[in-house]
Amino acid sequence: MKNQLALAKKEKKFRTVKEIGKAPSDLAELQERVDEAVKLKQQIHQLQEDIKGLRQGAVESLSIDPKMFNALVAMAYNNNFDQKKQECWNMEEAIDTITGGTAIASSADED
């Protein structure tokens, strides 16, 4: 019985757009919110294009790998340089353990 009451409380009944349309003020609010969301999505799209341009500029002028540029942007955005550095250190340690330390020496010889 308790579980049925808990489920009944959690259940949210949504109105259909047709039902919302019966109240002109609700329909106007819905339209405003949809219009605003569309504008924001357009702004996001433009900003994403701007970021692509920044990346392409870095690739052309600095010859940086686009994936590395994206990774640096992500780390700066998420402010998780220390976490990524630790993950790299953990991966290096795992590779050294598995290969007996020969993988790092081999890749260094290639440079």
Image (tube, grey):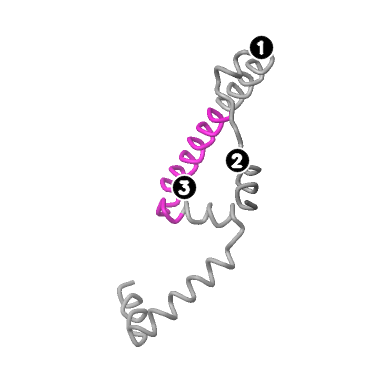
Residue at the limit of the structure toward the bottom, as seen here: 100
Amino acid type indicated by mark 1 = Pro
Of the numbered discs in the image, which one, if any, rests on residue 11? 2
Mark nearer the N terminus (3 vs 2): 2
For the residues bearing labels 2 and 1, Cβ distance under 8 angstroms = no
For the residues bearing labels 1 and 3, Cβ distance under 8 angstroms = no
Say few, some or many: other residues with alpha carbon within 10 Å of mark 3 (under 14 / 14 to 19 / 20 or more). Answer: some
What is the distance, in whole Å, between disc 2 and disc 1 at their CAs?
A: 26 Å
Q: Nearer the viewer, residue 24 or 87?
A: 24
Q: Which residue appears at 53% of the width and 66% of the height?
A: 84
Query: Which secondary structure lies at badge 1?
Result: helix
Question: Is 100 placed above or below 92 here?
Answer: below
For the residues bearing labels 3 and 2, Cβ distance under 8 angstroms = no
Which of label 2 and label 1 is nearer to you?
2
Q: Quadrant of residue 35?
A: top right
Span of residues in magenta: 40-68
Of the numbered discs in the image, which one, if any, rests on residue 24? 1
Amino acid type indicated by mark 2 = Glu
Q: Position of residue 11 (x, y in %)?
A: 60, 40
Q: Position of residue 50 (x, y in %)?
A: 51, 36
Of the numbered discs in the image, which one, if any, rests on residue 58? 3
Q: Which residue appears at 55% of the width and 57% of the height?
A: 75
